Amino acid sequence: MNANAAAMGGNAPMTREEKKVILASSLGTVFEWYDFYLYGSLAGLIGAQFFSAFPESQRNIFALLAFAAGFLVRPFGALVFGRLGDMVGRKYTFLVTIVIMGSSTFLVGCLPNYNSIGALAPIILIGLRLLQGLALGGEYGGAAVYVAEHAPQGRRGYFTSWIQTTATLGLLLSLVIILGVRLNVGDKEFAEWGWRIPFLVSIFLLGISVWIRMQMEESPAFKKMKEEGTHSKAPLSEAFGQWKNAKIALLALLGLVAGQAVVWYTGQFYALFFLGSILKVDGFTSNVLVAWSLVFGTGGFILFGSLSDRIGRKPVILAGCLIAAVTYFPLFHALTETADPALAKAQKSAPVVVTADPADCSFQFNPVGTAKFTSSCDIAKAFLARNSVAYTTEPGAAGSVATVKIGDVTVPSYDAEKLGAAAGAAGTAFNTAATAAIYAAGYPKANDPDRVKVTGVFDVFRGQPFKVVVILTIMVIYVTMVYGPIAAALVELFPTRIRYTSMSLPYHIGNGWFGGFLPATSFAMVAQTGDIYYGLWYPIVIALGTFVIGLLFVPETKDRDIYTYEGAR
């Protein structure tokens, strides 16, 4: 082990230099989640600004596709910057990534809209999103490796867990700035120009981060390797072209990161989606409730990172995956019963059944609300999905018109394509009759007084809102269990010469793809089956798969000396 690292061992308080290492490394992940939440929250406004030449429905699609572009290229960024990090050095590589990432975020706020420069506006926007995604692909691996290689033996879980907290801090920071700007400039002005301010504010984070990082030293492990001439000349081929190393990367993905990713995205993002899109809780209330759960749960990152130094990375991460998988169904049922008690009661007392010709039913995936459903089955299911009414489907006679049975009332649907010009009147009649039936059966209206609602940031410390926050905080604690130790676990799996490259790819495939596409995938499963809880099978199955693979095949690494470890043999 490096002598400097050994000297830092034990349980002594962090020195000023160690705190600076953690701060410099962590600001990049603040950027990561600040940017993620900004673009995700403001996608509708961004679509109106940069895709205004298209109908509103197409604007939404293009805005979401631009958002997804950042996820898709993250693994490629991991390969590009991971290779540089293993060849050139940790410090300079992740200094480059934060400059690219921060500059791209700032430039989104400066970019003229479609009305000003035409088609060039969306082209540049997508280009900036691609740059952000590429830079993020190299940022996390660099930060995690840099901190871990400065950390004392036996405290890497604790040191690297500080990086993990900044994802939550980035979310909170973006939430505070968005709400603050909106309240100060007004909704109309925010939609016109105020949305740019949160992006422009990022320049201050960039300046501070670059200034701090410029003063940091290269990691001791990389310096030692360079001095001995043992650094890799071809880290990509060594990491993934040799099965002994590629196998570890694959096990890291399937046995650690995939489960960590779905538990993370379920606890922080799908829970927010579930509150707003399925339980119809208003946006302000949803954001405030989730924000408080993050505040209450954030300390868990440090707690479980430290615990992993004592009992191991695997027990903490895999326990988080297993507990989450076992408890998600009761937790989300409790969330419904607490946040929207009328909906929970109606689902039990007045079950809904759609009877339709199976050939009349198509795949009900409509995440941005733009798909046009014309068959009687699709129209019936789309109506129920819009109103968050859970249903089951029974096969009907071939060629028959679908019907919706709500409690004791049966409402016939209609085929818009066959009716042609008369479809408008038929649609009005169906919507009127079906709406009256679901309300009569006890399903809640949009302004239902029993649905959870807060009017102020500190309005959560009472009955119903506080109970919702408790449920959400439990899920955030699961997030801290799986995410707190993950950086240390990934760093310790790979030798110094290919560490940056090897750990970055499984991390970004797991979190960018398995996690990043979780909300849309789970929503598709809900829409197709009519069961508002069915989308939970996606994170449950992956988390259980990670638990089994990790338990059987992933080695424990907490006592591994990363200064002397030379990799799989």
Image: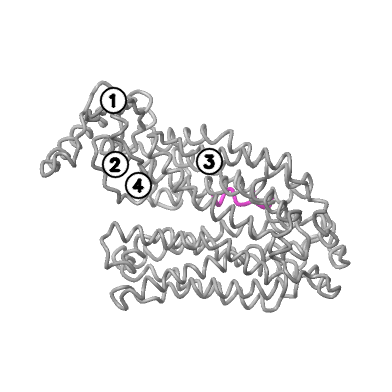
Kindly identify the residue that appears in the image at 58 percent across and 49 percent down: 261
Q: Are marks 4 and 1 in contact (CB under 8 Å)?
A: no
- Find residue 364 and report its horizontal and vertical position in percent: 35, 41
The stretch of residues the image draws in magenta is 294-303
Q: Which residue lies furthest to the top in this view?
A: 408
- Tell me which label, 2 or 1, sits earlier in the chain: 1
Disc 2 to disc 1, how far (Cα)?
A: 32 Å
**Quadrant of the image containing the N terminus:** bottom right
Disc 2 to disc 4, how far (Cα)?
A: 21 Å
Q: Mark 1 points at which residue?
A: 396
Q: Mark 4 points at which residue?
A: 366
- Find residue 50 and report its horizontal and vertical position in percent: 34, 69
Determine crowd level at label 3: few under 14, some 14-19, many 20+ residues with C-alpha closer than 10 A: some
Front in this rendered view, residue 458 or 273 = 273
Describe the colour scheme in one phrase: one colour
2 vs 4, front mark: 4
Kindly identify the residue that appears in the image at 67 percent across and 65 percent down: 143
Disc 4 to disc 1, how far (Cα)?
A: 24 Å
Kindly identify the residue that appears in the image at 40 percent across and 71 percent down: 196
Query: Was residue 307 drawn as part of the magenta stretch in this picture?
Result: no
3 vs 2, front mark: 2
